[in-house]
Image (cartoon, grey):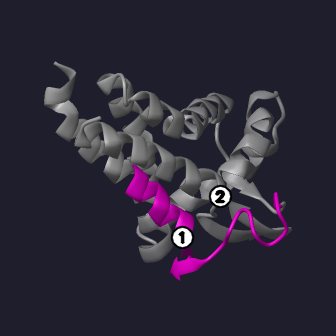
Amino acid sequence: MGKGKSLIFTGGIVTLIGTFLFTWYEFSYITVQYANGIGGIQNFMDLLIPSNFYVQRLELDRWVIQVIAILMLFFLISGILQLIGKKKRLVGLVGTIMPLLMGIGLVLGGSVSLLGFILRYLEIYGTSEYLIEGIIPFHLVIIGRAAIGSFIVLAGGILGLIGVIMSKEEFY
């Protein structure tokens, strides 16, 4: 296996770990909520049913919520797409785009508050439940509101992108 394919595979593993085992940031909504992939899975069906909770909470039209649900699903499976990218370069590139953009948004939004308005929309990923109490998802604030998971997701996207670029000659 070439270096590029190894980096794509490593990027996929890092993206999955950052998405599901670590939190990205915390916010208060009735209770303290932690945004991560587990909360995204728990709240995904709430976006698809015709309720008005997210429409009223985020003050968005119903069709925008449905587009957000599609992007959310794409992000949740992006680590798997990166792993498949070990065999198919295009799938690896597609799987790398979302964690890279999401990681940039999370780091800038959580640490610099440059994209702070984005964090409001990412509350869809929020959950107050743990898989293992106090351990998974792990919450450690690095800068501002940005937790360690934001940086891990960004690192997975960067590794995947470098791997896709390096593996150009390996697929011909």
Q: Please report contact status of discs 2 and 1: CB closer than 8 Å, yes or no.
A: no
* Mark 2: secondary structure: loop
Of mark 2 and mark 1, the one earlier in the sequence is 2
Circle 2 packing at 10 Å, graded few (<14), some (14-19), many (20+), is some
Instruction: Give how far apart the Cα atoms at labels 2 and 1 are.
Output: 10 Å
Q: Is residue 29 magenta?
A: no
Mark number, residue 21: 2
Could you tell me which quadrant the N terminus lies in?
Answer: top left
Q: Position of residue 87 (x, y in %)?
A: 36, 24
Q: Is residue 146 magenta?
A: yes
Circle 1 packing at 10 Å, graded few (<14), some (14-19), many (20+), is many
Q: Residue at x 73, y 37 (%)?
A: 44
- From the viewer's perspective, tell me whether residue 105 is left or right of residue 62: left
Q: Amino acid at mark 1?
A: Ile
User: Which span of residues is magenta-colored?
Assistant: 130-156
Q: Residue at x 54, y 70 (%)?
A: 148
Q: Residue at x 56, y 34 (%)?
A: 77
Which residue is the extreme one toward the front? 1
Q: Residue at x 66, y 72 (%)?
A: 139
The residue beneath circle 1 is 148
Residue 59 visible? The answer is: yes
Q: Is residue 100 above or below residue 72?
A: below
- From the viewer's perspective, tell me whether residue 146 is left or right of residue 48: left
Q: Is residue 130 above or below residue 111?
A: above
Q: Amino acid at mark 2?
A: Leu
Residue 106 visible? The answer is: no
Could you tell me which quadrant the C terminus lies in?
Answer: top left
Taking depth in this image into account, of 12 and 36 the one nearest to the observer is 12
| Front: mark 2 or 1 | 2
- From the viewer's perspective, tell me whether residue 101 is left or right of residue 29: left
